[in-house]
Image (spheres, grey):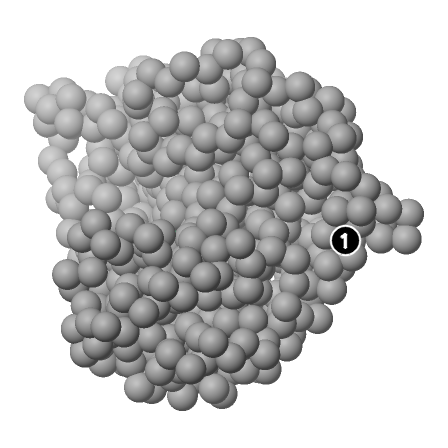
Amino acid sequence: MCGIVAYIGDKEAFPIVLKGLKRLEYRGYDSAGIALINNEGIANFKQKGKVSFLEEYAEDKDSSGTIGIGHTRWATHGLPNDVNAHPHLSGDGKIALIHNGIIENYDTLREGLKARGHVFHSETDTEVLVHLIEDIKNNEKVSTAEAVRLALNNVIGAYAIVVMSIENPGQLIAARKSSPLVIGIGKSGDFYLASDATPIVEYTNEVVYLDDEEIAIVERNKGLRLYNIQNQEKTPYIQELELQLEALEKGGYEHFMLKEIHEQPRSIRDCFRGRLNVDKGWVGLGGIKDYEQKLANANRIIMVACGTSWHAALVGEYLIEDLTRIPVEVEYASEFRYRNPIISENDVVIAISQSGETADTLAALELAKSKGATILGICNVVGSSISRITDAGSYTHAGPEIGVASTKAFTAQVTVLTLMALAIGHRKGTINESKFRRIISELELIPDKVAEVLRENDHIEHIASIYKDAANALYLGRGNSFPVALEGALKLKEISYIHAEGYPAAEMKHGPIALIDEEMPVYVIATKGTSYEKVVSNIQEVKARKGKIIAVVTKGDTQVKGMADHVIEIPETDEHLVPLLATIPFQLLSYHVAVMRGCNVDQPRNLAKSVTVE
Ligand code: F6R
């Protein structure tokens, strides 16, 4: 949510910052802006809308300068317009600031500043912060860096900020609390700052991730100094990035979402590489090795997550309860954190998050930690906040996910949860050896089976063309296919703006069945397994009300084929692994519907990928 980028060095800053903003546009696309320091002072370019509008706007203007800060916005305070766009300037125009996060006490601060003569032009909390820095600097007669530190001591809320001042054009000041910030250390005394490593990777692979309440001062050709908010100097911990530049390109696909859907055979394989050995009959997750026993002995496992990651957690609940017999609760992180939950030291709380930055998930973990629970993470983004505050965790290794709608992250999360359930169940003896071996052999085949489902693309595109104009859709599933139904509905609504609901198939009779008429497409997961006959009955109930049935079935199925308007076949697999296959047709279907409806697939309206505000 909001992306920030900054550069200082001896190259032109504008193209570097602009390119960085394009890479971070998935974090918000309400407005974009770049400020530079050059001979004219601070040049500040801001435009409502996408980064490309900013690029066009700046084309015929002087955008020279070797220090610059840029921002792509997901609006929280104030409309998405040019005035509210970042960077924001101090009253005297000498300090420029970009910000990702929310200053919760901005109203009080603004009233105080107004009383001291400050005039505000925007409705944002960010403008208040830059005025506060200016106010402190002028009244306390301190450096800009010290004014930033003192100002942050007065701030309640979340922030990742970068500040530059005309009085010191060789310096950038950066700080974070609850919103991410990474500093890339260039090879020639230059620095690249950003919300995540994607704008940095093409220049350097040496990075420092800021921790909460750390302030960094980077100076051209001088280096990086790090302080905590109490002003004690710290030693920066330099890490090596493993990100590959190609992973950030569309690689010939029309959209990132389509590329990411098609990457799943590889991303699932990468996820279990080194964690699964079928010949030796072994499964292990290195990252949580030291916590396996703790997990096996846990009274309860609580999973906290949001959105698609919450759906993955629901699949995990089925897997873990069935294979380990440990009770599992799945919680919306945003609810968990505010409802005084009962947590004991024998609980293990697992956060699931693609970005590793979701504010509610992070806060839920902090709450669990404060109550003494063991906290683990399942994240995709390496070095993200969640991965750093947890006791231990497992990365999903899906590679960067840039399309706002999550696809490959979901299947990778489910893969990690499957491995986790298998590892604990095996250790506890709650799965017998032959069942264990059968599931791991099947898991190893999943990437090829996903590839087989992807070959159904044209057929799925055809189905999409028939139902693209439906105003509503229902998704039904039972058991571990119920979360797949929820996820299918979420994918459709978020990228094509069609109203869709996911339900446990049997719940239909308790209300939603009233919605069914001949206009209503009903997507059903009707694969072979424990609930098959029950789902068949539910399909009949829909048919009797003239609903249109589009069923995901096991290859070779004839019974549902005889009833449904359309079927999409997926290969047979162990029942525990069905979600990994059944979710793929729904991803493709949503994608095609959205494209046919002319929607912006990779950047759906009102959304942003990394939700760093609650
Ligand atoms: C939906 C989607 C969101 C995210 C949610 C959590 O396609 O992407 O619902 O799943 O915002 O994000 P993470 O997983 O980064 O915590």
Image x and y of residue 79, in percent: 15, 52
- Residue 300 vertical placement versus 356 (above, below): above
Which quarter of the figure has residue 310? Answer: top left
- Would you name the residue on which mark 1 appears? 438
Q: Residue visible at 41% across and 14% down?
A: 342
Can residue 54 be seen here? The reply is: no
Amino acid type assigned to the residue bearing label 1 in the image: Arg
Drawn side of residue 419 relative to residue 42, left or right: right
Give the residue displayed 47% in from the left and 19% down from the top. 368
Judge by depth and name the residue closer to the eye, 349 or 57: 349
**Label 1: element kind:** helix
- Which residue: 58% across, 14% down? 346
Instruction: Decide if residue 571 is on the left or right side of residue 478.
Output: right
In-front residue for pair 310/354 = 310
x then y, percent, for residue 24: 45, 57
Using the image as rendered, state which of residue 261 and residue 214 is in the foreground.
261
Q: List x then y, in percent, for residue 94.
A: 31, 40
Question: Quarter-wise, where is residue 522 in the image?
Answer: bottom left
Q: Is residue 549 visible?
A: yes
User: Cβ of disc 1 within 8 Å of ligand 1?
Assistant: no
x and y percent of residue 200 in the render?
Answer: 59, 54
In the image, residue 129 above or below residue 32: above
Extreme residue in the right direction: 280
Instruction: Specify whether 273 is left or right of 66.
Output: right
Residue shown at 39%/47% (left/top)?
307
